Image: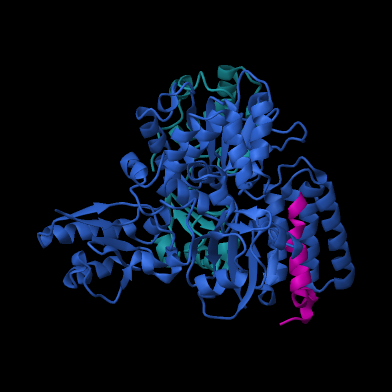
Chain colours: A blue, B cyan
Amino acid sequence: MSTIIYVPNDSAAISIGADQVAALIAQEAVKRSLDIEIIRNGTRGALWLETLVEVVTPQGRIAYGPVQPEDVSSLFDADFVHGGAHRLALGLTDQIAWFAGQDRVTYKRVGLIDPLSLKDYESHGGLVGLRKAITQSGSDIVAEVTASGLRGRGGAGFPAGIKWKTVLDAPADQKYVCCNADEGDSGTFADRILIEADPFTLIEGMAIAAVAVGATQGFVYLRSEYPTAIRRLRDAISIAQSAGLLGSSVLGSKHAFNLEVRVGAGSYVCGEETAMLESLEGKRGVIRSKPPLPAIAGLFGKPTIINNVLTLASVPAVIADGAAAYAARGTGRSLGTQVFQLAGNIARGGIIETAFGITLETLVNTFGGGTLSGKPLRAIQIGGPLGAYFNSSQLGVSMDYESLAAAGGMLGHGGVVLFDDSVDLAQQAKFAMEFCALESCGKCTPCRLGSTRGAETIEKIISGVDVPANKLLLLDLCEVMTDGSLCAMGGLTPLPVKSAMNNFPEDFTGGAKK
Amino acid sequence: MTYPSWSIEEATRVLSALKNVQGPVLIALQAVQERFGYVHEDAVALIAETFNVSRADVHGVLTYYHDLRTSPAPARCIQICVAEACQAVGSRELVAAVEKKLGKKIDETHTDVEIKSAYCFGNCALSPAAMVNGELVGRATVEKVTA
């Protein structure tokens, strides 16, 4: 029997040589007449160990990493095909502390399976939720999702069950389920990895949502910056169609559900749900005023569920294992697990899924291992470009919706970006304003014009021009943007700016610093 | 990547496949760009006529999205992520070094090679990230992106 060797086909792994590693392993095995089978799995999320090569042995999967193309021949010399000792050997993958300390629910199959094998998917617990859902009433499914406490993982944190209930109760001849996969926040990649590593979970979650509310058409709005994810999800949808998971009769039930991928065109604000709807309708991605809520009048004016990838991908586990099992995790009103992403200047970056309530300290130091540069950690931005900058004295904060809000920040999509002591927070604040100026859809004046004026004002502070007066002006402008913008783009851009000013006042003193 | 030169007949063929798409304007522009590498000015009227929308609507969509371009793509396109997670590991310095080596400024239009700012490829644990002719590059260096 051939020995199975896993080499990830995740785009991040490929970006540092996974394809070459896979090709060299195949070549070397032929040269040495070894009987191996290479399976291209998704990444297991430890991007700092990529390319992570795993060998299946009677004891379990044994890991080697990070493997560079030039290491392949020495791995064979060390008989890694049978789990031999090598300087890159990491032991059993499941026992590596970085993995063992996690609680993978939404990500339970990620990296374990061939992403496009429906057989692997089912043998790892896939389709249990959907099979259960097609025997239940819509209101029972919605009640289960509500009871699980699952909240929107895109950033807003709105309870998913309540949104679904609104769509369920809205009478209409056509309803839609839209998945927001426009993961534009810097420092986030959990949507991309899930789609590349376990696309059927997203498809199953969307099908459950559709069955629950009576929607027959779904769209995944996926950003153009993720070409591998686009290809893989389209392949998975076509496999799901052939297998009867999608189409006129979902798994032989009376429910019809069709699913289509729509590709974004490089606009950050299209990650805002109403701008996404406009873009799905083929228009400029300009946000809509609410009300009406998309749950009442969404895509093409019809009742529409809009959820983030991680929200929808958590649904199969909620239905399969029951709401109570999901809600048993977490803290306060932040129930279940969060897929955190460790990024930026970090020694051990990647995906950490744990129950809510882990401290930032544990994430950054125990899992992350501190900065990549080895220099002192100075700033941590949580929640993407619209999230707050924290300083290194604030590591005790609990990572949940309420605690982060109380600390003056937000969870956002769960991205955690580290900066060492070379960072200049005045420059980061200016960038936040410049990014808003670049990406503003233009609908609200405080966002469209305020962002440009904000960048100019921060530049004046940096240059030492009327520093106290310009700081006051900047705070006033931030207040106008917060209160006067319709969506989070203009409304939350002041968050990184003000948190930088509050938590790093020494960077806003004009020419006097450094 | 090489593309055929603009032809209204070929564009008409490309658009005919989209007749039944709901909300077709953005998809039509993306399809034209995928075929020809850019959106020729004559495509605006053609799309407007094909889908019975105003030329202003098509122009509005064309000018809104960063991905859509109105001039042919250069033979070589280097996109460098300049967002926060990449800034944290030196993307500002990387941009400066690439500009110096190629003698070209970022976000200016050139026919042979173009350096463009990008905002996140979702490779933030292996930053800085870049995309060179559609291939994602992790732990990007001047050597890797200009190779």
Query: With respect to residue A458, does A112 lie above or below?
Result: above
x 71%, y 62%: residue: A403
- Splitting the image into 4 quarters, where does residue A418 fall? bottom right
The x, y position of residue A40, in whole percent, is: 31, 51
**Residue lying at the far left of the rendered structure:** A33
Nearer to me, B91 or A45: A45
- Splitting the image into 4 quarters, where does residue B26 fall? top right
Determine whether, in the image, residue A476 is placed left or right of residue B55: right
Nearer to me, B34 or A501: A501
The x, y position of residue A148, in whole percent, is: 60, 46
Asked whether B60 falls inside the magenta stretch, the response is no
| Residue range highlighted in magenta | A491-514
Question: Where the C terminus of chain A falls, by quadrant?
Answer: bottom right
- Splitting the image into 4 quarters, where does residue A13 fall? bottom left
Determine whether, in the image, residue B43 is placed left or right of residue A172: left
Determine whether, in the image, residue A351 is placed left or right of residue A113: right
Determine whether, in the image, residue B57 is placed left or right of residue B98: right
Q: How many marks?
A: 0
x 78%, y 81%: residue: A512
